[in-house]
Image: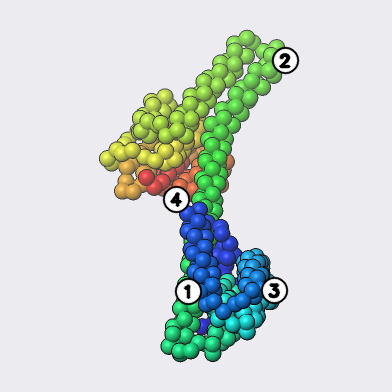
């Protein structure tokens, strides 16, 4: 056995009453009360004390009871020598009682001291105190076999109590660790949800509001420069259209956060129809996780926005595929050859960079770049587990 097992204190949770049910505490005090009654009856049944000796023995027993009570406190504080000193008081009092002729008193005090030592002290010192106590007891016994049985019973009781308390302490520590893990898990889930909401706010509101700001600023400059009413009205109408689009996207984002989204292919059909794009859906449709469906929507919107910016009027082909364990969205514009050199070199702008981060958070990927020699234009391809 490693040396630290002999010198280590029982866990604080084991030495305290933390986690002990009330019924268990009541039962413990009932058992202690019964043992005290049996002990006092044995002392009186000996009938060896006379007169003031009873008062002296009673005072000694009360002093030892206080010492045991204090020992429970000092062992909880891990004060080794103070605890040993308090238990030694039981051994000395037992020896004095034996000198006065009360063998039952001496035996009871020595056994209690041994049990408490094995139960609450480090195992090495505890067994040492128990050995001294039993060493005082054995020579006073007339028969060796009953004495050996008493010694074995005392050590077994003390060690059993020690194991029971250590098991309770370990269970309490495991419960505390489980509660801490649950709190950490809840905090992590809350942070993840906050990050999810923050991404939606950035992807929807920031894009919509910035576009509206551009149109309104342009309208202000036109008004200041005395431009035609039609030009100013066109900018205001564009800003209003962006506001409506932002409101619609915000509602979709809120529905997504609540898990109330329609199928991605239905959304893609609406987007394709509004943008004049061609959509092809392959595979067996199925319900997707909210985050995966939202990623498909956002990437489609961002890709079509880039087409409007860098290849206005280009033909757009969209393909959405239900694959085994994942879904794939491909958006290809066929006429962006002269408009996407810078975008292709950087792997997309900040919008697609955010979409790539979203895909990677879901364990997927997003590729954006030239279509290659056999496929002109610019291609955005998303794959996410679903």
Which residue corresponds to the image point at 55% horizontal and 65% vertical from the top-left? 14
Q: Earlier in the sequence, mark 3 or mark 4?
A: 3
Residue that mark 3 sits on? 82
Answer yes or no: is residue 129 visible.
no
Mark 1 vs mark 3, CA separation in Å:
23 Å
Q: With respect to residue 130, does 254 lie above or below?
A: above
Q: With respect to residue 191, does 247 lie above or below?
A: above
Query: Quadrant of the rendered structure where residue 205 is?
Result: top right
Residue that mark 4 sits on? 363
Query: Quadrant of the rendered structure where residue 105 is?
Result: bottom right
Which residue corresponds to the image point at 54% horizontal and 76% vertical from the top-left? 47
Q: Secondary structure at mark 1?
A: helix
Residue that mark 1 sits on? 157
Mark 2 vs mark 3, CA separation in Å:
90 Å
Residue 336: x and y in percent read: 48, 37
Q: Earlier in the sequence, mark 4 or mark 1?
A: 1
Q: Are the residues at dot 2 and dot 4 in contact (C-beta closer than 8 Å)?
A: no
Q: Secondary structure at mark 4?
A: loop
Nearer to us of marks 4 and 1 is 1
């Amino acid at each position: 056995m490693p040396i630290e097992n002999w010198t280590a204190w029982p866990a604080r949770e084991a030495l305290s009453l933390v986690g002990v049910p009330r019924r268990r505490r009541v039962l413990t005090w009932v058992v202690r009360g019964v043992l005290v009654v049996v002990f006092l009856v044995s002392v009186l049944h000996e009938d060896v004390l006379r007169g003031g000796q009873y008062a002296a023995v009673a005072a000694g027993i009360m002093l030892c009871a206080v010492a045991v009570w204090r020992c429970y406190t000092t062992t909880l504080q891990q004060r080794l020598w103070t605890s040993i000193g308090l238990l030694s008081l039981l051994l000395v009092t037992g020896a004095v009682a034996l000198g006065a002729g009360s063998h039952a008193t001496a035996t009871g005090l020595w056994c209690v001291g041994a049990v408490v030592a094995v139960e609450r002290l480090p195992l090495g010192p505890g067994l040492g105190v128990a050995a001294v106590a039993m060493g005082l007891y054995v020579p006073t016994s007339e028969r060796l076999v009953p004495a050996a049985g008493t010694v074995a019973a005392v050590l077994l009781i003390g060690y059993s109590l020690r194991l029971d308390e250590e098991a309770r302490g370990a269970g309490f520590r495991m419960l505390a660790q489980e509660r801490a893990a649950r709190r950490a898990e809840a905090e992590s889930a809350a942070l993840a949800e906050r990050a999810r909401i923050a991404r939606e706010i950035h992807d929807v509101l920031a894009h919509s509001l910035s576009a509206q700001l551009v149109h309104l600023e342009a309208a202000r400059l036109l008004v200041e420069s005395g431009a035609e009413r039609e030009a100013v009205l066109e900018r205001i109408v564009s800003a209003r259209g962006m506001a409506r689009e932002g409101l619609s996207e915000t509602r979709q984002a809120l529905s997504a956060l609540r898990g109330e989204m329609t199928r991605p292919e239905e959304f893609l059909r609406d987007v394709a129809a509004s943008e004049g794009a061609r959509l092809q859906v392959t595979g067996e449709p199925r319900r997707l996780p909210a985050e995966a469906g939202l990623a498909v929507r956002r990437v489609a919107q961002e890709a079509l926005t880039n087409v409007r910016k860098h290849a206005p009027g280009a033909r757009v082909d969209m393909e959405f595929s239900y694959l085994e364990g994942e879904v794939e969205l491909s958006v290809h514009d066929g006429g962006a050859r002269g408009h996407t050199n810078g975008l292709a070199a950087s792997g997309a702008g900040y919008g697609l960079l955010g979409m790539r981060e979203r895909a990677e958070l879901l364990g997927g990927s997003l590729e954006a770049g030239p279509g290659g020699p056999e496929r002109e234009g610019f291609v955005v391809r998303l794959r996410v587990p679903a």
